[in-house]
Amino acid sequence: MKKIKLFDPYTDKFEKIAINRVLESNFWASGEGNGNVKKFEEKFSKYVNSKNSVAVNSGTAALNLALSMYDIKNKEVILPSLSFVSTANAIIENQGIPKFVDIDEKTLCIDPKKILESISNKTKIILPVHFGGFSSDLTEISKICKKNKIHLIEDAAHAAGSSYKNKKIGSHGDLVCFSFHPVKNLAMPTGGLISINSKDHIKISKILKEKRWCGITSRKGVDYDVKSIGWNYYMNEFSAVIGIEQLKKLDKTNLQRKKNAKKYFEQISLDEKMPFDKECSYHFYWVRVKNREKFRENLLKKGIETGTHYKPIHNFSLYKSKIKLSITEKIGKEIVTLPTHPNITEKDLEKIIKTVNQFV
C-alpha cells in the first residue's frame, strides 16, 4: 500500500545540479553570508517586496534574532498559543514574557480583539502567527501597534508565498520570520530568513548579520571585533542554492497546494474545516473532529499520514499557567492536519477525501 506523506518536499533536477556545483566549488559556507547566501537574500527580498532580508539557518534562529533587536527584558510579547514552541521559546531566550491570547475560531490565527484586551504598559511586541499559511488580520494588528507604539514581528514559518491584501507576506511587519525546514513550502535541509521593512533597514540588516555570526564586526582581513553577543546562525551555501531553485517554482507549487486545499474545502463533509482563500499558501489543510485518535487511526490504516498542529504552548510544563484560552484549548484537542504538498496525485486526493468522509 502506498503511503501518502503529510509533508514531502518537491524537487527536480535543478536542486541536484545546484548542490553539485557548490560541492565542487569547495566553498560551502561563509559566516559573512557571501556567495549564494547573498544571492538568495536579494532574490527573496525581490519576491516578497521587502526592503531587506537576512538569511539564517532556521526559523527558530530568525525568531531569536528578530526579538533580540528590541530590548524585551521583563517586557511582554503578545502571541497565540497555537504555534510551534519556538515562537515562545525565542521570547524566553531574550528574557521577555510571553503573553498568550486566544485565536479566531475560523482562521486559527490570533484574534485582534483579544490582543486589545491584553495590552498593558509592559507590552513591547505583537507576534502573530500566520497559521497554516493563512494570514493574520494584519490591518487590525498594525492599527493596534501604531496606536500603542508597539513593534510588529510576524511568525511566517508556514507562509512562504502567502499574501495579505495582494501584498506578499514578508512585506508588512517591521520584521518577518520565515522557516525553510524540509517540510515547509520553500524547503531546504535547514534554513530561515528575516524579512525587514523598517525605515532603518540598512542599519538593522547590518546588526542582524553581525549577530548571526557570533557578533563578529569591523572585519579587516583576519582581524575583527566583537561588540555584542551573537550566535552561529548563518546559512550555508547548500541551503542557499536549494532555496534559490525552490523560490523559482514557489508560486507554481503553492498553486497546486491551493488546488488541493480547494478540493478539500469543497468536498470534505465536515463542518469545521479550514476556509478557502486564494491568498493562503496552505502549508497544510486542517479539519476538526471530536474523536481525533480514532479518526487518525482510520486514515493511517489507509496509508494516509496526518498531524495534530499543535499542542497549545501554554499547556507545556515550561509555560504552564492558570490562563484559560477556551478556543485554543478546544482546537488543540480536535485539530487534524492533512497533506497539501504538490507530490499528491489526484488519486491520492480522492482517497483522502473519501476516507475522511467515511468517518463523518
Image (cartoon, rainbow, N blue to C red):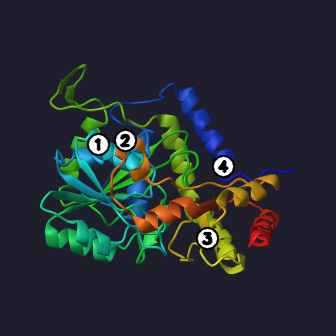
Q: Earlier in the sequence, mark 1 or mark 2?
A: 1
- Residue type, numbered disc 4: Thr
Q: Which mark is residue 318?
A: 2
Q: Nearer the viewer, residue 95 or 341?
A: 95
Q: Whole-Å distance between the Cαs marked 4 and 2?
A: 38 Å
Pointer 2 with pointer 3, Cβ within 8 A: no
Q: Which residue is mark 1?
A: 92
- Residue type, numbered disc 3: Lys
Residue, x 58% and y 62% (percent of image)?
335
Q: Residues within 10 Å of mark 1 (few under 14, many from 20)?
A: some
Dot 1: what SS? helix
Q: Whole-Å distance between the Cαs marked 2 and 3?
A: 36 Å
Q: x, y percentage for residue 215?
A: 23, 31
Q: Which residue is mark 4?
A: 11
Q: Earlier in the sequence, mark 3 or mark 4?
A: 4
Q: Is residue 275 visible?
A: yes
